[in-house]
Each structure stands twice: as structure tokens, then as C-alpha cells.
Amino acid sequence: LHIINKSMILVIPTTIPPWNTTSFSSFPYETLNHEITTKLFQDTTSIKTASSDFGKLVQQIPTAVFHPSTVSDIARLVKSSYTASAPFKIAARGRGHSVGGQAMAKDGVVVEMGSLINGGIRVCGSESLGFYADVGGEQLWIDVLRATMKHGLAPGSWTDYTYLSVGGTLSNAGISGQSFRYGPQISNVLEMDVITGIGDFITCSKTINSDLFYGVLGGLGQFGIITRARIVLQKAPTRVKWVRMIYEDFATFTKDQEHLISLNDHGPNYVEGSLIMKKSPANNWRSSFFSIQDESEVNSLTSKHAIIYSLEVVKYYNESTTKTIDEELDEMFNGLSFKTGFIFKKDVTYVDFLNRVRSEEVKLQSEGLWDVHHPWLNLFVPKSHILEFNQRVFIDIIRKESKSSGPFLMYPMNRKKWDYTMSVVISDENEDIFYTIGLLHSARNVEEAQIINEQNKKILTLCDETGIKAKQYLPQYYKTKEEWMKHFGNKWSVFEERKARYDPKMILSPGQNIF
Ligand code: FAD
């Protein structure tokens, strides 16, 4: 084990640890009923999977892994812990795509949500609610896409990567280039079934058990395990125009991003952006967008400018708008100040666009570059500090000091699409727009991961000291209660009260290190 600091243990498991596979030592095994114990596993594969995540930075070994078949199995497990004289910790694990051990449960039980066999996806519609899908919390968004597309429908709000679980992203927020228009995924939920830390099964919405509903959305798994979510659907497009434009000046780049997200229905459906540098070239692991010739033209700009910026825009269309889509694009781009001649277009199916990161994953998997360390840092930065952030972080730290090739993402969000009543924390500044920043590093070895980890901490300290007021998204660097209190700001007391109400014995999602 390579200790990074007391709360983060960086590991490369070179050998399989001597797991105890024959007895549930220090675990109230005898108090659990037969239906539960038959679904608890301690085999090497189950334990090893549940002790690791996409970050490969933290290892927390659970006592056992629970493979539920039904929602009632999960309720029984949680109730057993709640009523035990010494309650054990329980973490729902979507697919372990966290990077800081958030879905782990040291000495507790990890619930592999993917084992559920009856959650499913049901597409429905009603006059009052419109179209929606009832989706098991364990489902992957890619499966939601496949099931809803059969009806010509789809959710409006996505994450860049669709192989994430519904319960996992709703515990955070679920953001992507569509969020400025459709809100984060948590803004697109009508109702949920949740198993609280008491083991109670509760249906909640904005009108029924609303306190639990608002608490769970963005609640970092602290108040309950989501077993069903009712997701708003829209008519799905069939194709998209996918465009990237290159900027040499950061202020112009952000001005155009902000302009695009201010447009109404005639505007884009998706807006993102990324940095291009010598060490982080135009085609990165997230998306091979440019042809070889275009890529070399774009990359050649990096010899003149330390960083150039790529604005990424998507406009959906279908058969009925095929004839007018190019005109619509021209109108939308009217007045933008990207570098003349540096606009690149693609025309792909809607599904291929949403699946873009998966295509890159398959390539990286084959090259052995996916299953590596990921010391990521995701932030929300107020619009009023974004120029300063560019100078102090992108230019002074990422460009000058970082060896990583990213990708480095940044794109704006409309604050009005976020519901302040939900647990999720965005930015204290009361501004219409804030930016999301994704420093999505990969590291080839522990030493590299350690250096990037230190750099991430340096960025957080810098933001603190200079008053940039960044908030962590998918938070992973808080070690003390004081830091969490600061993160939540004036939401902390409600967060704490909800914990006392729905998980009074502090059983759920211990890997977040909040309570
Ligand atoms: P896990 O990592 O397994 O769990 C995350 C947390 O939620 C844990 O605390 C866990 O205990 C809890 N949890 C899991 N399931 C449930 C449930 N059913 N009920 C209650 N709590 C639960 N995020 C974005 O917002 N936008 C992106 O574009 C994006 N892109 C990504 C791309 C990649 C390649 C990766 C690896 C991650 C990306 N993420 C993105 C981050 C992702 O949203 C988080 O990792 C999230 O945790 C979902 O992963 P998961 O479903 O595997 O959840």
C-alpha cells in the first residue's frame, strides 16, 4: 500500500490479499436471516471488485458483498443492520465509476446494484405527466437509452458516458453538455422509490415525502438507496450535427459559450468545451473528433498559443428538419468569433453521439489504457471567477506544471435549471451562470497519480486562498467535518437533519467520508 494521506490510500494491488473467504469474522452473521446470508459473498472476485473503483486510488475492503435479487432483499439487509446491536455500514455500488472510494464500505457490506434482476425499464405516458420511464436504480443509462429509443423517446439530460448507473448519477447530479438546457439529471426526476437507512421502503416525489425526494437527489447516497426513478422523457431526435470550433482567446471562447446557452429553442441542445495544448492534443481519449488533417491543423496552433480552446456544439434534428438544419446551424453560429476557417462538422446518429465515450473506451481497453489510475478533479466555478481560473489554474498549473494529457473540460451551466432545495451543491455566488471544470487525468503509475493528486490539492487550496469559490463536484478531497460543512455552506444543517431522520445510525455510503 502506498499511503497518500490518512484518508486516501493509493494502491496497486499486485497480489490478491489473503481475504477471509471462510467466515464472516467480526460481522453479525448470526443475526441475519437465511435469505440475506445466501446472497452475501466473500469470494475473492466479489471482494476485490467492491474494494476498487474507476479511480484506482483508494482501496477499502468490505467484510462481504451483497448480491440482491430483489428490492426487498436490500430492504431486509438495511433493516438487519439498523436493528443490530452493532450496525454495519452499507454502500450501494452502481458500477463503481467513482474515483475516490465513494461506493466502498470498509468492514461493511457493499450492495452490487447490478445484481438486481427485476428493476427493469418501463416506458409510460400520461396526460398529466407526459412521457416518462420507470427505471430501476441499478440500470445503466445506456440501457435506458436503448429501451426508450424503441418508442422514439429519450431522456433530455445525460452524462458524457452512458455506462453509469441511474442511482449513482442521481446521487451526484448527472451533468453533460445538455444540462444548460434540460437541467442536470436530478432535475429530470418525477418520483423515486428509496430504501432509507432505517430499512423503510418509501416512494417520494415533489409532493409525496418531498423532504426525502429533495434530500436523495444529489445526496451522495446518504439518505437512502434509490431502487426506482421516474425519468422525464422527450421525443428523441434521430441525428445530430456535431460541431467543434477553435478559439485562441479564452474570453472570446467563454463569451460565445455563454451566448450559445442563452439562446432559446432555436439554440443548441448541447454545449461543452475543452483545452487543447501540445500535451493534450485535439483528439483526446474522450472523443476522436477530428480527421488526421484537421487534427494536425488544429494542433499546429499550439506552437503559437500555449492553450487553445475547442467549443463543442450539438444540434439535434430528424427527418422532418433535414432540409433546414444547415440553415439553422448557420443562424445559430451567426456572430460567433471562432478562428476563421477553424470550424469542423460531423453528422452522426443521436445514439452514436451519446455513445461517444464508450467508443473511445473500447479503443483504450484494447490498448490497456482504460484500466489505469484516474486522479480526477471536478469543480463548479462561478462565472465571475472564470477568467482568473483560466490564468491561475489552466495556464499557470495545468499548462506549465502538469504532465497529464487530460482531457480538460469546461462548459457553462444555467443556474435556473438547478433546484436549490436538492442536496447537490453548486456555487455560492448568486450568478445566472457557473462553469463546470473536469480535469480528467489518467496516470500510468502510482508515482504519477500521486503527483497529480498533489496538484489537485494545490488547485483546491489556491481556489480557497484567492477567493475563486470553487465547489467540488463528485467531492473526494474532504477529510474533516469542517470541510464538509464549508462545502455545503448554508445547506449543511438541513443535510445533517436529513441524515438524522433517514439514516440515524449512519449506515449508508460511508465511502463519502461525511459522517
Ligand atoms: P458508484 O460510483 O457505484 O456510486 C456513486 C455513489 O452513489 C456512491 O456513494 C454510492 O454508494 C452511491 N450509489 C450508487 N448507487 C446508488 C443508488 N442506487 N442509490 C443511492 N446511492 C447510490 N458524471 C457526470 O455527472 N457527468 C459525466 O459526464 C460523467 N462522465 C463520466 C465518465 C466516466 C468515464 C466515469 C468513470 C465517470 C463519469 N462521471 C460523470 C461520474 C459519475 O457520475 C460518477 O462516477 C457516479 O458515481 C456514477 O457512477 P456509478 O453509477 O458507477 O456509481
Image (cartoon, rainbow, N blue to C red):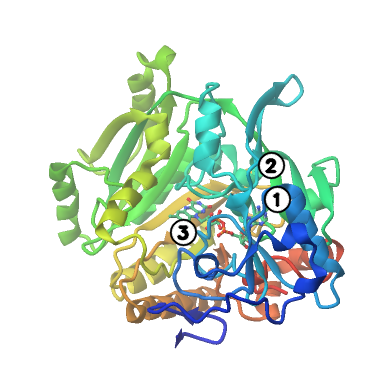
Q: Given contact means CB atoms under 8 Å apart, are the residues at marks 3 and 1 in contact?
A: no
Q: Where is residue 310 in the image (x, y as percent from the top left)?
A: 32, 48
Secondary structure beneath disc 3?
A: strand
Q: Bin the neighbour count of mark 3 within 10 Å (Cα to Cα): few under 14, some 14-19, many 20 and up.
A: many
Image height of 501 relative to 246, above or below: below
Q: Name the residue under label 2.
A: 229
Pointer 1 residue Cβ closer than 8 Å to ligand 1: yes
Q: Quadrant of residue 430?
A: bottom right
> Amino acid type of disc 1?
Ile
- The residue wearing badge 3 is 437
Q: Which of marks 3 and 2 is nearer the N terminus?
A: 2
Residue drawn at (33%, 30%) of the image: 348
Q: Quick check: 384 left or right of 339?
A: right
At a point 58% along the width and 37% down the height, the residue shown is 182
The spot of residue 384 in percent (x, y) is 52, 59
Nearer the observer, 497 or 258: 497
Q: Is residue 119 above or below residue 97?
A: above
Quarter of the picture containing the N terminus is bottom left
Q: Nearer the viewer, residue 346 or 67?
A: 67
In the foreground, 82 or 279: 82
Is there a contact, CB below 8 Å, between mark 2 and mark 1?
yes
Q: Quadrant of the C terminus?
A: bottom right
Q: Which amino acid does label 2 sit on?
A: Ala
Q: Earlier in the sequence, mark 3 or mark 1?
A: 1
Write down the residue under mark 1: 226
Image point (64%, 48%), residue name: 116
